[in-house]
Image (cartoon, helix red, strand yellow):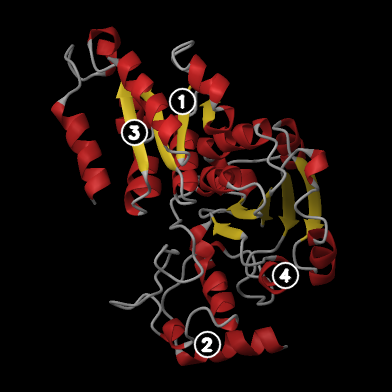
Amino acid sequence: MRKTCLRMVYELAQKDERIVFIGSDLGAGVMADFKQNLPDRFFMEGIGEANMVGMAAGLALSGKIVYCHTIATFLTRRAFEQVAIDVGLHHANVRLIGAGGGAVYAPLWHHRDTFTADDGARLTAALDA
Amino acid sequence: MRVLYDDVIGPKDIVILSKGHGCLAQYALLVDKGVIPAEELDRFCREGAMLGGHPEHHIPGVHVSTGSLGHGLSLGIGFALADRSRRVFVIVGDGECNEGSVWEAALCAGKHKLSNLVVIMDWNHRQSYGDLDDVQPMDPLAEKWRSFGFSTRMVKGHCMHTLRRMFAYAPLAPKFARPLVVIANTVKGKGIPEVENAPLWHHRDTFTAEDGARLTAALDA
């Protein structure tokens, strides 16, 4: 599913030059064609989600459409303030893609459960504010 | 900030006051430049007023809402990457640089060789609770920034002449391929002896008419 989703981002980026992708040290090889063919719009940043989300907001407030990809809980928890303020408050055109909602990252969730309702609710509240 | 607004920034440039609690200085300059009406200063922090205790993006001349510390540099990186022909100035506090997100951003700015980005660090040696050296020492500052890929300048933050001369070379020319940090050595509350370096003046909200007269007199002295 992640592969299909990111593939779709690449397809959209080929049609719209405003589209930019930012990742956070994930998905080796998955976006190889994006990186090779649209290098100016492909950013693979380090393991620093707060910076990634803030940077995405700055790009979006400059007219870009930014797709941000990392592990879901890093968006809902670690970088939550950047999501709420930098993206949500400014209504910045940032699309957040949270991966790892299933069993592989189960220790990140409250219970050995998948993406929990409270994480989804938290993100929805931040972006609708 | 006076030098920035008078002599440096142009219409394409972006100023981000990441230490948003310093917003009164920015509001005064925006009034001075005719961007916001002077009457708004008298309504500061009142119900329904344009100007609150931290800058908000709906205020003319304010690009992003700030005040939650550690956000401005990452936002500035986004602005700088989106258009490398614009110049981006991000003003951070020395206490603010306790935040880990500042250093995530510094790593990122160094990596992208953002020669159109200038960080201005207000090195006033004080944070909210007291001295930096007691709460969270930040030395050695220049070495820290340099190791993250920045060029560094240490300047006297109250010397307008020095600042004007320094900003003539900021940002760096693209051939240097690195962002610049200006570490401005300042005194918190400079110009009013009873306020200088006094932690209780980090936030003050109630003044009598006599207080106002005394502070104004001290500034004029």
Residue extending furthest left?
Answer: A117
User: Residue A101 placed where, x, y %?
Assistant: 25, 18
Q: Quadrant of the N terminus of chain B?
A: bottom right
Q: CA distance from mark 1 to mark 4?
A: 37 Å
Number of marks present in the image shown: 4
Which label sits in the foreground, 4 or 3? 3
* Element type where label 3 sits in the image: strand
| Location of residue B138 by image quarter | top right
Name the chain letter of the residue that bears numbered label 3: A
* Residue A104 in picture, x, y percent from top left: 28, 7
**How far separated are the C-alphas under marks 1 and 2?**
52 Å
Mark 3 and mark 2 on one chain: no
Which is more toward the observer, B93 or B113?
Answer: B113
The amino acid on which the numbered mark 2 sits, given as a three-letter code, is Gly
Q: Which mark is residue A23?
A: 1
Distance in Å between CA atoms under marks 3 and 1: 10 Å
Q: Residues within 10 Å of mark 3 (few under 14, many from 20)?
A: some
Residue wearing tag 2? B212
Q: Could you say which is closer to the camera, residue A6 or residue A53?
A: A6
Q: Chain of mark 1?
A: A
Callout 4 secondary element? helix
| Residue sitting at x 59%, y 60% | B15
Residue B209 located left or right of residue A117: right
Instruction: Name the residue beneath numbered marker 4.
Output: B3
